[in-house]
Amino acid sequence: MIKGVLIDLSGTVHLGAQEIPGAVAAIRRVQSSGLPLRFVTNTSRMPRRMLRELLQRLGLQVPPEVIFTAPQAVHRHLRERQLRPFLLIHPRLMEEFADLPQEDPNAVVVGLVEEKFDYAHLNQAFRLLLQGAPLLTMGRTRYFEAGVGLQLDAGPFVVALEYAAGIQARVLGKPSADFFHAGVAELGCRPEEVVMIGDDAASDVGGALAAGLRGILVRTGKYRRGDEDRIGQPGAKVAKDLAEAVAMILEEYAQDPAPRSRA
Amino acid sequence: MIKGVLIDLSGTVHLGAQEIPGAVAAIRRVQSSGLPLRFVTNTSRMPRRMLRELLQRLGLQVPPEVIFTAPQAVHRHLRERQLRPFLLIHPRLMEEFADLPQEDPNAVVVGLVEEKFDYAHLNQAFRLLLQGAPLLTMGRTRYFEAGVGLQLDAGPFVVALEYAAGIQARVLGKPSADFFHAGVAELGCRPEEVVMIGDDAASDVGGALAAGLRGILVRTGKYRRGDEDRIGQPGAKVAKDLAEAVAMILEEYAQDPAPRSRA
């Protein structure tokens, strides 16, 4: 029984500033069905405020809490443990952490920060790790297409710091089970009641299945032929795009004898 | 039967500009014994020319070929395969590679280069690796004591590039067997006939034993109590310092019925 939906943003709903055809109408179908919904993203450069603006420009009005990002998961982790972060993250993401104390840091957060991945900043992070600070990250992505060719993402720098300090980073973004379970909790569901829809076979779909959710891989965004074999977990479904994925979900939801009882 | 000796430099013969007490006299004893000798070092900042000058200041005159460094091993590897290196190495080491073509590079060499470990240079290396360039390095050292605290060595950046490009670096320095075997070949010996003496339990002694050499760990330089347990291979000996290690070797060498036959 499906009781909630998690949807990836980049490559599933939009590509850059463009809607992936049919995505907005599909999301409206979910909204009118009564199925609770969260957008889940490892966003490395855009705070929630900007993601909301992006969805608005595509014609979708959503309250802030419908967007659940990896930086928010990191923020919650830091706040709950009263940690003071040393932030190697994109300048635009700094606003998400503005309410936390950052003097005398005792935690290291690594995101995608490009020019700040220099020797001085990495040494500063390294020394904090040696003093026992935990290493938190939004993901272990290897590289991304930067328009001028592929560029290193945060993952290689996370791995470098892990190796240097002999520690393991905690990933608070897809594909970590912690992150999916936080999203599931926001929906008020159990993992097996939730479907994750995304274009990244390993991070979106494989991660969701490993965390006990259901998963649908869409053939948009970064999807490349054969990605079905990279999911690494049994039980995934595959759809042409978000519109088809939503149709599959709503068909199953409609067969549920009392679909409105939890709306 | 011992037929040759490999000796580490930093921490075994000298510490900075200072001799480790008794080291020079011990080296002279090896020289007069007729046992062939090579100094082997992963030097990340000093070309062979400077290492010779350093030994000269300690009172040791040695011909250049007695010093065998990781950058030289990298140089030989590049030359034999007609590779054009992209060099992320210390400026002082550039002279070791000055005779190789460096236009349109098709190999990546990573050493300790501190300020050059920036996003632009690492991306350049990353893109060459994606095009199939091999990744060569002098070692996988995690960090070093820089006087102002610990700093990241080349290892973390090697690991970052390996992770990003999904490849494995080739280590042409201690503790790689390739490097020890190159040193053994320079002595005209077989691995089991050669003793390696050094202060790094894993890199000097463990590496040598794994490559089929003998090994003596000296309790000078970076040696810390309990390092004997970090050798990771059976059969190592332990000596107070280079002087005692040489005494042990010459005692065994003297028991050889015809020690001069191969001098």
Image (cartoon, coloured by chain):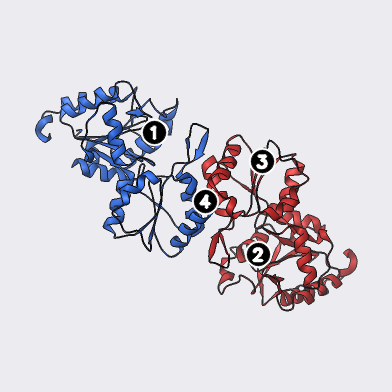
Chain colours: A blue, B red
Q: Is residue B230 left or right of residue A16?
A: right
Give the Cα separation between the discs numbered 3 and 4.
23 Å
Work out whether disc 4 and disc 2 sit on a shared chain: no
- Amino acid type at mark 1: Asp
Q: Look at the numbered disc 2 and give the secondary structure of its residue.
A: helix
For disc 1, the marked residue is A200
- Amino acid type at mark 2: Val
Pick the front one: A154 or B247: A154
Q: Chain of mark 2?
A: B
Q: Look at the numbered disc 1 and give the secondary structure of its residue.
A: loop
Give the Cα separation between the discs numbered 4 and 2.
33 Å
The quarter of the picture where residue B104 lies is top right
For disc 2, the marked residue is B205
Marks 3 and 4: CB-CB under 8 Å? no
Disc 3 vs disc 2: which is toward the camera?
A: 3
- Is the residue A200 above or below the residue B113 in the image? above
Disc 4 vs disc 1: which is toward the camera?
A: 4
